[in-house]
Amino acid sequence: MNFRTKARKSPEVDITPLIDVVFLLLIFFMVSTTFEHESQILIELPEATGEEIQREKQQLDITINIAGTFFVDQREVVNTEMETLKMAISKAIGDRGNIPVIINADARTPHQSVMTAMDAASQLGLTKMTFSAHKPALE
């Protein structure tokens, strides 16, 4: 008769499946996360209440800073002349047709600059225009 107890193995936890699940979750969140579109141009948008619209994949952003300088898709336009702005817009849209135009104008931008941007876009056949604004803070 053998009265000796067998040596027990210490319990082991296999963490390989746990690591696999963590990596899969990490990949899922990285792929499904949307990042907010941030502009590198410093402008203070005016306040407005209203419905928020969804950004489209193909759109043209015209940004106007406080000095009235134009930026077409984050690229500065050489001067504030209508013809220069029209050339910059036509170069940015290429052959994409009538894409939506979003005008991001600083709250203190001269009204003439906004009208110039709208006029240049409409002369090129761009008729879908909207303005960016931010919602006022709730008090």
Image (cartoon, rainbow, N blue to C red):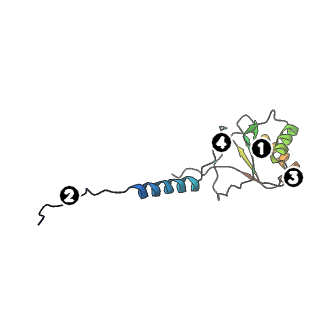
Specify the quadrant of the image occupied by residue 113.
Answer: top right
Closer to us: mark 2 or mark 4? 2
In the picture, the disc for residue 39 is 4
Chain-order first, disc 3 or disc 1 = 1
SS for tag 3? Answer: loop
As shown in the figure, which amino acid type bears the numbered disc 4?
Answer: Ser
Kindly identify which residue carries mark 3.
125
Whether tag 2 and tag 3 are in contact, CB under 8 A, the answer is no
Kindly identify which residue carries mark 1.
114
Taking the image as shown, residue 134 lies to the left or right of residue 25, namely: right
Whether tag 2 and tag 4 are in contact, CB under 8 A, the answer is no
Residue at x-position 68% and y-position 55%: 55
In the picture, the disc for residue 83 is none
Q: How crowded is the residue under tag 3: few (<14 C-alpha within 10 Å), some, or many (20+)? A: few
Residue at x-position 73% and y-position 42%: 63
Q: CA distance from mark 4 to mark 3?
A: 26 Å
Q: CA distance from mark 4 to mark 1?
A: 18 Å
SS for tag 2? Answer: loop
Taking the image as shown, residue 10 lies to the left or right of residue 71, namely: left
Chain-order first, disc 2 or disc 3 = 2
Residue at x-position 25% and y-position 57%: 9
